[in-house]
Amino acid sequence: MSAKLEYGNGNIRVRFTGEIDHHAASLLRVSIDSAIAQHRPKTLILDFGGVTFMDSSGIGLVMGRYKLMQQIGGVIRVENLSPGAYKVMRLAGLDRLGELRQREVS
């Protein structure tokens, strides 16, 4: 698992690649939370386009970042979810916390 953080226009975009499991989610939390504290973005964009596997830790990762963004008055957007991940996140109620977008099929 890796994550590339990009900064611009008051936003932070995190592009995930690989697998998100408990161990990876713990490491990602630290780097994302540090970036949020330092840059205080208006929007945190979590881009799941490169994710090949995700367990429930991915849902926890999104929920925790939502709470952190809420504390600083920002919003969260989750993009490029696979159809399965999109369905699971909707069932978990994450669509009520921020914007969820499925991966576009070409």
Image (cartoon, rainbow, N blue to C red):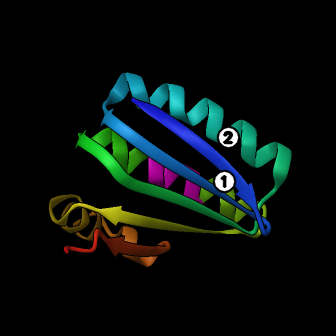
Amino acid type assigned to the residue bearing label 2 in the image: Asp
Q: Is residue 2 left or right of residue 7?
A: left
Place of residue 103 in the rendered image (x, y in percent of width and height, measured from the top left): 28, 68
**Residue 71 horizontal side relative to residue 94, left or right:** right
Query: Which residue is drawn at the image coordinates 36% and 74% (left, top)?
Result: 101
Q: Residues within 10 Å of mark 1 (few under 14, many from 20)?
A: some
Q: Quadrant of the N terminus?
A: top left
Q: Please state, as top left, top right, bottom left or bottom right, where the C terminus lies in the image.
A: bottom left
Residue stretch rendered in magenta on the structure: 61-66
Q: Which residue is labeled 2 in the image?
A: 33
Distance Cα–Cα, label 2 vs label 1: 8 Å
Seen at 15% across and 60% down, the residue is 84
Q: Is 33 on the left or on the right of 10, as rendered?
A: left
Front disc: 2 or 1: 2
Query: Most extreme residue toward the top, as rendered?
Result: 23
- The quadrant in which residue 53 appears is top left
**Looking at the picture, which amino acid does disc 1 mark?**
Leu
Residue appearing at x 38%, y 54% in the figure: 48
Tell me if label 2 and label 1 are in contact, CB under 8 Å. yes
Residue in the foreground of this view, choosing between 105 and 33: 105
The circle drawn on residue 68 is 1
